[in-house]
Image: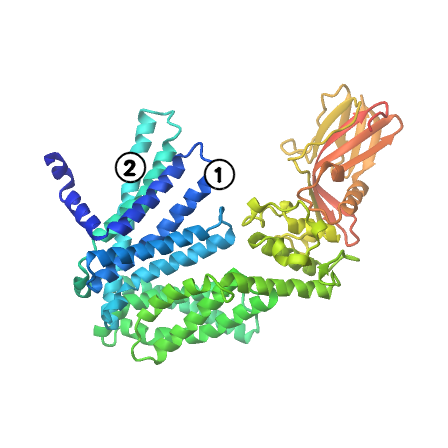
Amino acid sequence: MKVIKFFFQDVPESGEKTFKRFYLPLTVSFMAGALTIFLIYFEKFSTERLYSIENMALALGLGVPLIGTVFLAAERFGLEQRKKCISGLLALALVIIYYFTLPEKFHSMDIMRYILLSISSVFIFFSFPIFFRADRYTFRKMSFFMMNRAVFSIVASYLVFGGLSFAIGAIQILFVPDWKDSYRLIMSIFSASSLIIAPWIFFAGMPEVEKLTSVEPPEKANSILSKFIFIPVVLFYLVILYLYFGKVLFFEELPKGMTSYLILSFCSAGIVTYFFIMEESKNAGKGISSFFEKWFFRSVLPLTLLLWYAIWKRTDDYGITEKRYILIVLAVMLTVWTVYFIFSKGKNVVSVSVSMALVPLFISFGPWGIFETSYRSQESRLIEILEKNSLIENGVIIKAKGDLPFQDRKNLSSILIYIEDRWGLSRLGELVPAEAVAGKGDTNSRGYLRYSYHNSASSALMTWMGLKFVSEWENEKTAQNFNFYLNSRNGYTIKGPFDAMIFKSCPEYGSTGKEQPQNTAGLLAEFSKDCRTLTVSDNGIKKYEKDLFAVISDLKKRSAGTNDYDMTADKLTFTDKSGETAVQIVFMQAYGNLNSEGNTESINSLSLYIYISGSAKVQ
């Protein structure tokens, strides 16, 4: 015990005292950390059980600040231990209910909802001082103290993580160079630091509730940070935004896509600075802190007009998505805060904290929420595009009678992949013909379909309609390109016999385009410098020659509506013969440009397998 006392001082006693006071939130944080560490080391668990444990760890992590708030509130109102425990268990019951609502595997909507609930849970905790009904300066001091404790806890726990990680690295380098699982131990330490040590340090530093009103945050450090860092940076940012605002007004230039994010970032930095300088401005007379407190929200008011204009332009063109819904909600909150802090005499920052606690929770569910509103908006856009191009009949999508303008195809592709990514195309009901997407779409890819849309039901539906799917990275200029890639996941069979198989690329990178002989019993395949002409010769005698422009134009027409990045061998195979020489060409990749009529204009790169028979026997 003396050795423990010598090294750890009063840490054991402090830890025991902290656990007795906050036993339930600390137990929950320990369980979340233990489950996370278990997941790092799992080997033989089924996927279903793995997802269940992941969801349990996520739900418990969400419950730590919520249960901590309940315990602090119980102390504030002087509840006895039994009632305090019951209150905490009720909060834990909400966490358990949330756990049972989670899907087996998280997709993009579930991740977004979890983030919203996490933000709400954290701000509920930091809004705890409202139970004191204190003035704005006291509320600010208490909230600031709690935030300082949070930052200190995170920094201290990650210092523990960093120190132990370096020690493990040193042991591996010096003593156990073949230690392949060291990363698991490092990840476990990170999980323990984040979910066990950090909460423990935070709660250990919380004074008795009745003493919270008298805590003194480091005002001198706040003053230095505000005067010499925060305020100058925010004012510089403000000048940039006003210059851009003037450019929009005088040159009638539409706001850029990032305008909303820039304004909201500025306002966030400004509100944090406002929070920092409140105490300073109260005693500073006519100093820069008082100037900032008086004029910050007044300077924000014109920028809210630019913000709303930028949001309106985006939603009018592309409808509402989760991101734009959040932008609208933040714009509403910013507008309300701005009006409140300009005209209210109270100017209590509790309004900001409470709104950040309640609004994310409110918008995370229900028909008014972020997901249902986004779905209705995109469904409406989808119907509008289908009706405009006569692609809907009796409430069902039909095949196209001709090609669509590029922008309509891109919008249609974007909406379909968006809906499939979140809900699956089944959400559209009878609008989507069953035969168009039968057996298509991979639910495991949901949330990532923007990167793997070639597996999607949306791409299959567009192909069924006779339209080419357009990815979000394509534009009208790149639409004039061709870019074929063979689906390497599916094999193909070439019927022989054949005398040689040659793999050939153009240009031949690393060889400056020089022709290189193939070890194929005298048979040689060569490209012209512009990759247009393929020539096959036998011991110097020309046996076959083909203009690949015509071949690629034909492949492009044969693959109309097909996803160029995931094509099967039958779509990329060309068979031909000249005299006694027969060839079968399988394109692995081809990239180049088309002219306005859809014919090949240039070839930038080619990779293909050439199967050759000198007796015209390739089938």
In the image shown, does 609 or 408 lie closer to the viewer?
408
Dots 1, 2 in contact, CB < 8 A: no
Residue 310 can be seen in this image: yes
Residue 55 image point, x, y percent: 42, 47
Residue 530 can be seen in this image: no
- The residue shown at (24%, 58%) is 84
Helix, strand or loop for disc 2: helix
- The residue shown at (72%, 59%) is 396
Q: In this figure, which residue is indicated by the disc labeled 1? A: 47
Helix, strand or loop for disc 1: helix
Number of residue marks: 2
Tell me the kind of residue under disc 1.
Thr
Q: Residues within 10 Å of mark 2 (few under 14, many from 20)?
A: some
Residue 355 drawn above or below residue 12: below
- The residue shown at (32%, 57%) is 90
- Tell whether 565 sits left or right of 66: right
Q: Residues within 10 Å of mark 1 (few under 14, many from 20)?
A: few
Residue 160 drawn above or below residue 275: above
Q: Which mark is residue 202?
A: none
Q: In this figure, which residue is indicated by the disc labeled 2? A: 164
In the image shown, does 182 or 70 lie closer to the viewer?
70
Tell me the kind of residue under disc 2.
Leu
**Which residue of the protein is positioned furthest toward the left in this rendering?**
2
- The residue shown at (27%, 45%) is 197
Residue 109 image point, x, y percent: 50, 55
Q: Residue 608 falls in which quadrant of the image? A: top right
Q: CA distance from mark 1 to mark 2?
A: 31 Å
The quarter of the picture where the C terminus appears is: top right
